[in-house]
Image (cartoon, rainbow, N blue to C red):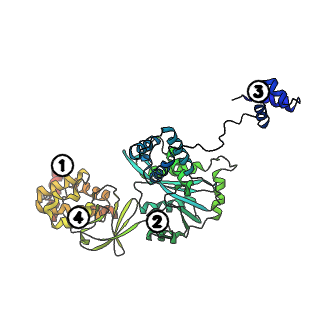
């Protein structure tokens, strides 16, 4: 191949100095066809095939290769055939005698032809895209996989990200509540993938049947929905990009936070800081472009959507209700009754009729038991012999004064003392643990060991009155004798003083 310098000299000799092709061929020692080629191209054009390579040995096997490549599209990407593996199969299974190069070239050509092409899109203001991503985090000292809800506005590139312990329906709904609160309004439409949280099923004509929860969410906020093609993540490329961006920029190195609340405060701060950035190809910041989005948004309703899963069930004989393999306690008075579980992202609420009878922090473990000891005290008062073996009370951390009170009650009153101790514990059904603790400490200080004394002192603390204990109801306490002063006693005292 000739260098571009010889091209320049030949072309100048012919076009500028007036040399003919014959003269140039004689002068430069080149063939006339070569000189003509130099005059046709300003730079070396490189080798160009006049027709595709013909491989007679491969011809009858191309259909087999095409079938293998088509089948690969239905398999995991890490288990697709390589060119070498296709060659081995052609030789072993079909008697192919050709070489590796023609197989490799054909596979490369077919792979390039099958790759999808895309059209650049323009995004008008007022629309959004939503999806979930995953990242490893350390929450409360425990390394775990967090699932974060990503909400992107394609026109302005403004975003909102919130993390959850699991990708659940209630997290999906809570993510929308939080995103709408963050932006202060609701987009006209939101684009999703075909998650089962939103789409119950896809009909033959491509229409989606929405899930009940998603229909409720949509009816509450009145936004329109759009869905990408199944398996085509590029249909919502903006939020797919946000998932990767937030993981690389907000969660590297691995975040360490004491709770998900603290982690989400950090993520929200990152989203706010990003509003000041100016992206490539734009003269305005994200925050400035966000104003055009917000100008087309829908107003927020007066109250957020109740982001929970409602699950009817029945209380067991152990006063427990089960939700997703975990058991939560309710007061024993509601045993065997029909109740409604309302499962939120961080809380489990149990309702009987219109009354909320129990609240628990939600557990994401499996086969866990979550007890509230107060739920079982009324039953323990009647079944006092189960006090020391009651699972709901195991691990219940109470101040030292509680154990002191129990020891004194049991040493003085036996089984009746146990029952009075449970009665003292039941005071926490109506009063705060701190108030009950203060009353117990005062009772111990006064030596008034009993339920009535603790209750009286507790009421006095609340009403800010001095205590008036009737010691006659405590026969085991020593009696104090107070003598009445007489006039004769004063006379004898004065005589002693005078003497």
- At 21% from the left and 69% from the top, the residue drawn is 317
Are there few (<14), some (14-19), or many (20+) residues within 10 Å of tag 1?
Answer: few
Picture coordinates of residue 497 (x, y %)?
Answer: 18, 49
Specify whether residue 98 is in view: yes
Picture coordinates of residue 217 (x, y %)?
Answer: 49, 68
- Whether pointer 2 and pointer 3 mark residues with C-beta atoms closer than 8 Å, the reply is no
Residue at numbered disc 4: 376
Residue 316 sits in quarter? bottom left
Mark closer to the observer (2, 4): 2
- At 20% from the left and 62% from the top, the residue drawn is 422
Q: Earlier in the sequence, mark 1 or mark 2?
A: 2
Nearer to us in this view, 395 or 327: 327
Residue at numbered disc 1: 497
Are there few (<14), some (14-19), or many (20+) residues within 10 Å of tag 4?
Answer: many
Residue at numbered disc 2: 198
Mark closer to the observer (1, 2): 2
- Which residue of the protein is positioned furthest toward the right in this rendering? 18
Residue 308 sits in quarter? bottom left
Q: CA distance from mark 2 to mark 4?
A: 40 Å
SS type, badge 1? helix
Nearer to us in this view, 113 or 208: 113
Residue at numbered disc 3: 30
Q: Earlier in the sequence, mark 2 or mark 3?
A: 3
Picture coordinates of residue 325 (x, y %)?
Answer: 29, 61
Picture coordinates of residue 458 (x, y %)?
Answer: 28, 62
- Whether pointer 3 and pointer 4 mark residues with C-beta atoms closer than 8 Å, the reply is no
Q: Earlier in the sequence, mark 2 or mark 4?
A: 2
Q: CA distance from mark 2 to mark 3?
A: 73 Å
Nearer to us in this view, 467 or 179: 179
């Amino acid at each position: 191949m000739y260098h571009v310098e010889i091209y320049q000299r030949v072309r100048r000799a012919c076009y500028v100095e007036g040399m003919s092709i014959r003269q140039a061929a004689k002068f430069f020692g080149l063939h006339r066809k070569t000189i003509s080629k130099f005059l046709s191209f300003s730079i070396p054009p490189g080798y160009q095939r006049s027709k595709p390579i013909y491989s007679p040995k491969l011809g009858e096997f191309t259909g087999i290769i095409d079938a293998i490549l088509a089948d690969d599209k239905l398999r995991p990407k890490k288990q697709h055939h390589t060119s070498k593996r296709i060659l081995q199969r052609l030789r072993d299974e079909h008697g192919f005698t050709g070489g590796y190069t023609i197989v490799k070239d054909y596979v490369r050509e077919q792979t390039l032809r099958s790759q999808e092409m895309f059209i650049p899109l323009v995004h008008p203001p007022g629309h959004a895209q939503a999806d979930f991503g995953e990242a490893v985090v350390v929450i409360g000292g425990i390394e775990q996989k967090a699932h974060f809800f990503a909400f992107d506005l394609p026109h302005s590139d403004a975003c909102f990200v919130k993390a959850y312990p699991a990708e659940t329906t209630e997290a999906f709904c809570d993510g929308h509540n939080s995103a709408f609160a963050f932006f202060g309004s609701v987009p006209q439409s939101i684009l999703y993938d075909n998650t089962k949280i939103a789409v119950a099923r896809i009909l033959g004509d491509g229409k989606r049947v929405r899930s009940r929860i998603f229909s409720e969410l949509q009816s509450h906020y009145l936004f329109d929905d759009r869905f990408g093609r199944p398996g085509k993540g590029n249909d919502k490329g903006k939020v797919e990009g946000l998932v990767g961006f937030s993981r690389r920029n907000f969660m590297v190195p691995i975040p360490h936070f004491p709770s998900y609340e603290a982690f989400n405060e950090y993520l929200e701060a990152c989203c706010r800081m990003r509003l000041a950035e100016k992206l490539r190809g734009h003269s305005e910041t994200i925050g400035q472009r966000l104003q055009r989005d917000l100008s087309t948004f829908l107003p927020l309703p007066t109250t957020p959507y109740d982001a929970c899963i409602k699950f009817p069930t029945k209380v067991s004989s152990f006063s427990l209700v089960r939700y997703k393999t975990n058991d939560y306690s309710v007061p024993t008075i509601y045993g065997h009754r029909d109740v409604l579980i309302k499962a939120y992202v961080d809380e489990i609420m149990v309702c009987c009729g219109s009354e909320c009878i129990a609240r628990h922090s939600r557990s994401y473990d499996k086969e866990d038991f979550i007890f509230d000891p107060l739920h079982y005290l009324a039953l323990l008062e009647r079944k006092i012999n189960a006090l020391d073996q009651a699972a709901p009370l195991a691990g219940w951390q109470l101040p030292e004064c509680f154990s002191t009170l129990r020891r004194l009650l049991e040493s003085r009153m036996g089984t009746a003392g146990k029952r009075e101790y449970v009665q003292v514990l039941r005071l926490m059904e109506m009063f705060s643990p701190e108030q009950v603790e203060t009353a117990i400490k005062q009772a111990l200080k006064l030596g008034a060991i009993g339920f009535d004394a603790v209750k009286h002192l507790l009421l006095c603390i609340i009403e800010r009155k001095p205590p008036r204990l009737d010691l006659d109801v405590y026969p085991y306490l020593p009696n104090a004798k107070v003598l009445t002063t007489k006039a004769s006693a004063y006379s004898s005292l004065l005589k002693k003083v005078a003497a």
